[in-house]
Amino acid sequence: MVLSDRGSWRVHLDRGTVIELGRGEPDQIVARTQRFVASVGQITARFDHRTIEYADLRHSESFALRLAGMGTAPVAASAGKGH
């Protein structure tokens, strides 16, 4: 767990996942973390239990995730497929 110069908490887990907890009062950080923990299992189950690479919990009513093998950029067509 690392505290930045600006007072923002970041957690690095053993499997490489990075979780941005952000700044705020301890009860705010705990509430964001509890919301994440309560729903993350459902989200990863929906996406074939992909590994969470990054989680940003700094938002007051939501969080953002980056899952392994998923992105928003279009994938280039494979060579030799005739496209």
Image: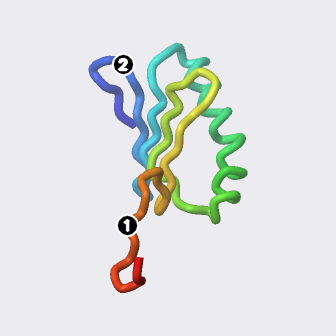
**Which of the 4 quarters of the picture holds residue 46?**
bottom right
Colour scheme: rainbow
Q: Which of marks 2 and 1 is nearer the N terminus?
A: 2
- The total number of labels drawn is 2
Q: Position of residue 33 (x, y in %)?
A: 60, 33
As rendered, which of 31 and 47 lies closer to the eye? Answer: 47
**At numbered mark 2, what does the secondary structure look like: helix, strand or loop?**
loop
Q: Name the residue under label 1.
A: 76
> Which residue lies at the image location 66% right of the left edge and 33% below the top edge?
34
Percent across and percent down for residue 43 are 67, 50
Which residue matches tag 2?
7
Q: Position of residue 73 (x, y in %)?
A: 42, 53
Q: Is residue 52 above or below residue 35?
A: below
Residue lying farthest left?
A: 5
Mark 1 neighbour density, 10 Å: few (under 14) some (14–19) many (20 or more): few
| Image quadrant assignment for residue 12 | top left
Above or below — where is 26 with respect to 63? above
Q: Where is residue 29 in the image (x, y as percent from the top left)?
A: 55, 24
In the rendered image, the residue lying farthest to the front is: 82
Q: In this rendering, which labeled residue sits more in front, label 2 or label 1?
A: 1
In the rendered structure, which amino acid carries the disc numbered 1? Ala
Quadrant position of the N terminus in the picture:
top left
Q: Which residue does the image show at 47% across and 50% down from the upper left?
A: 72
Labelled pair 2, 1 in contact (Cβ < 8 Å): no
User: How much space separates mark 2 and mark 1, taking CA atoms?
Assistant: 40 Å
5 relative position to 42: left or right: left
Observer-nearest residue: 44 or 35? 44
- Quarter occupied by the C terminus: bottom left
Dot 2 amino acid type: Gly
Mark 1 secondary-structure assignment: loop
Within 10 Å of disc 2 (Cα), the crowding (few <14, some 14-19, many 20+) is few
Q: Please name the residue shown 71% across and 40% down the image.
A: 38
